Amino acid sequence: MSRRGAVDATAHLAAVAAAMAEDGQPTATFAALETALDAVLGHKLFTILRYHAASGESERVWTTQPAAYPVAGRKPLNPTFWSRHVLEQRRPYVGRSADDIRAVFFDHELIASLGCASVLNVPVVWDARVLGTINLLHEAEWYDDGDATLGLAFAALAVPTLR
């Protein structure tokens, strides 16, 4: 089940925390999160979305693949299982297969074209409000529930960048 060796997340959490003190926010923290989460959990595609609860929209603020998923304006989010699970219940979503992705994302064909067939969506939560999500995508069966738990620790460090 594990596709990578055990990586001690401590140094990577510390690197993100150190980046939070640097000039050039939020870029410094976003870049540190991308690097740290690649080392600890791995990803082929990494994005960060800001959630605008009042309008029900999301806004991509960071991406590793700008040609496919550019940082750009807002898009409306439809009420779905995924939005209830991640945005209302504030729980990570682990999609282990292309079928899991197809069931919740309208752009599943684009995701598949990037070689991604699993997803980990982690809510960034502050004061019982979802500020956004950290999204990692990789090959099939890449992520599991233990990854979701670790992802929440990294997501907590994203709070200032999305407030």
Image: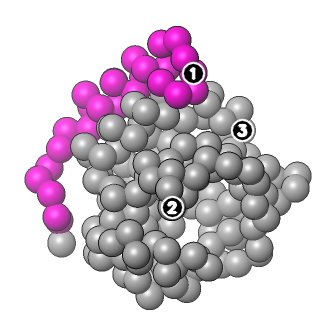
Q: Residue at x 61, y 47 (%)?
A: 71
- Which amino acid type is marked by label 1? Gln
Is label 3 in a helix, a strand or a loop? Answer: loop
Q: Which residue is mark 3?
A: 127
Q: Which residue is mark 1?
A: 25
Q: Tell me the quarter of the image containing the N terminus.
A: bottom left
Q: Is residue 4 magenta?
A: yes
Where's residue 116, x and y in %?
Answer: 36, 71
Q: Which residue is mark 2?
A: 68
The image shows residue 11, relative to residue 117, as above or below, that is above
Q: Nearer the viewer, mark 3 or mark 2?
A: 2
Relative to 122, is 55 on the left or the right?
right
Where's residue 85, x and y in %?
Answer: 63, 69
Q: Tell me the quarter of the image containing the C terminus.
A: top right
Decide if residue 56 is in sight here: yes
Q: Residue at x 16, y 64 (%)?
A: 3
The image shows residue 94, relative to residue 134, as above or below, that is below
Is label 1 in a helix, a strand or a loop? Answer: loop
Q: Looking at this rendering, what residue extends furthest in the left direction?
A: 5
Which badge, 3 or 2, is on the more N-terminal residue? 2
Q: Is residue 136 magenta?
A: no
- Find the distance from the CA under tag 1 to the CA under tag 3: 21 Å
